[in-house]
Structures are given as C-alpha cells and as structure tokens.
Image (cartoon, helix red, strand yellow):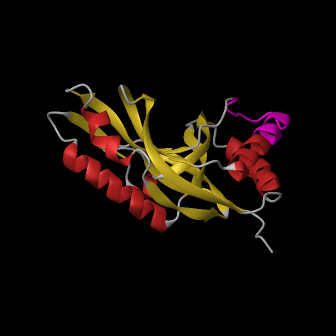
C-alpha cells in the first residue's frame, strides 16, 4: 500500500504571507549565484509546522483527524506576531532561512496539548520542543561564506505583522522537482473569543 507524506500546521494570513514574500524577494535580489543558491518556499507553502508525521499509511489519516479535532475544539483562538530573521543551525552555517515569532503562549499550549493527546491515542508525534518559525528558504549552496548573514543583518529584527490563528490544517506534501506542493486534507477550527 502506498504511503502519504503528512504534517499538521498553522496557516498564515495573506497579509503576513505578503510581508514574508517581500522579504524573500529582497533577499533573492541580493543572494543570487554565484554567492548563494537558495530554494525559496512558495507563498502558498508558508506555514508553522506543529508536527511532521512523515510517510504514513492512508488509514492513519482518519485517526489523526479525530485526535486533532478533539484537541483543537478545546483551544481558543490566539494571536501570533512574526518578527526577525534567522537560520538553522545558525547564521554562520545557514541551511534553513526562517522568520521567528515573538513569545506565543497560545501556540505552545496547543502544541503541548496535541502532543499529549496524540501520545495517549498511540499516534505518531515528534516528541521535541517546538521552535516556532516559518521556513522562508533552504540553502543549497553558499559559495562565499558569510554572504547570507551579511544580506540578512539589516533585517534581523524586522516585523512581518500579526494574525489571529483560528484553525490548523492537516496537509499532504507532494514532493516535486521544483519544491514540495501542499494539499489541504482537512482543517480544524478553534473556539472563537467571545
């Protein structure tokens, strides 16, 4: 039986996506071959990953959806503020370029609650500390060491706006030569603040 590649994520507002796109374009205008080669995440692919399930049996999707629905139904909507630039593992050896978030207790609470419920249900869950970020691009090559850090240094504290998180999404990832394409399998709505 074929497996499907899935992950659970927070989608971003169009306003935040536009601000991040503008930063991608700015960096791409400076970081072009021969200095660096970067695979930029498409606008529709910008998100915050809560859990990456990897390749799973299609029969698990329903169980994942049921557990997620139960958890998210208890969660109240919350705000996220997007700020700053960085790289994993660090700016000196960048492999993944990202934007971060200011302290986000609602997101951390949701992640912890999801992990607990998934573990109790015997479902796959990455048991690690959440490092909330949005991946902007993946570095394929940096020919001149320090060129990426130099390009990013003026915007390390840049503000990219905020959005209210009202739902999370279970995505299927289709690996393509030009980068992954994400298909929304189902979404889960949170309680609105009354």
| Total labels drawn | 0
Asked whether residue 105 is in view, the answer is yes
Question: Residue 21, relative to residue 133: is it above or below?
Answer: below
Tell me: 120 left or right of 192. right
Which residue is located at x 85 percent, y 36 percent? 120
Q: Where is residue 188 in the image (x, y as percent from the top left)?
A: 70, 60
Residue 177 showing in the rendered view: no
Q: In which quarter of the image is residue 162?
A: bottom right
Q: In which quarter of the image is the C terminus?
A: bottom right
Task: Specify the segment rendered in magenta.
Answer: 115-127
Query: Does residue 67 belong to the magenta stretch?
Result: no
Taking 55 as reference, is 28 above or below it?
Answer: below
Locate the N terminus and report the quarter of the image it occupies: top right
In this rendering, would 147 be left or right of 176?
A: left
State the residue in front, 139 or 171. 139
Q: Is residue 134 left or right of residue 129?
A: left
Task: Residue lying at the far bottom in this picture: please name it.
Answer: 194
Q: Residue at x 43, y 58 (%)?
A: 44
| Residue 40: x %, y % from top left | 33, 46
Q: Position of residue 180 (x, y in %)?
A: 41, 45
- Please indicate whether residue 172 sits to the left or right of residue 33 in the image: right
Residue 123 percent across, percent down from the top left: 75, 36
Q: Residue at x 81, y 38 (%)?
A: 116
Q: Nearer the viewer, residue 129 or 50?
A: 129
């Amino acid at each position: 039986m074929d497996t499907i590649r899935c992950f659970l994520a927070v989608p971003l507002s169009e306003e935040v996506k536009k601000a991040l796109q503008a930063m991608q374009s700015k960096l791409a205008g400076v970081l072009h071959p021969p200095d660096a080669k970067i695979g930029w995440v498409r606008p529709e692919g910008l998100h915050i990953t809560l859990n990456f399930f990897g390749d799973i049996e299609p029969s698990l999707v329903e169980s994942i959806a049921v557990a997620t629905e139960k958890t998210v139904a208890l969660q109240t909507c919350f705000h996220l503020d997007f700020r700053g630039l960085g790289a994993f593992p660090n700016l000196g050896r960048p492999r993944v370029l990202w934007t971060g978030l200011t302290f986000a207790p609602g997101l951390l609470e949701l992640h912890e609650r999801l992990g607990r419920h998934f573990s109790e249900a015997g479902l796959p869950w990455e048991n690690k500390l959440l490092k909330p970020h949005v991946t902007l691009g993946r570095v394929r090559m940096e020919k001149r060491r320090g060129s990426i850090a130099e390009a990013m240094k003026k915007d390390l504290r840049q503000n990219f706006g905020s959005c209210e998180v009202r739902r999370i999404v279970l995505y299927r990832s289709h690996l393509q030569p030009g980068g992954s394409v994400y298909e929304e399998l189902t979404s889960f709505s949170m309680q609105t603040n009354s």
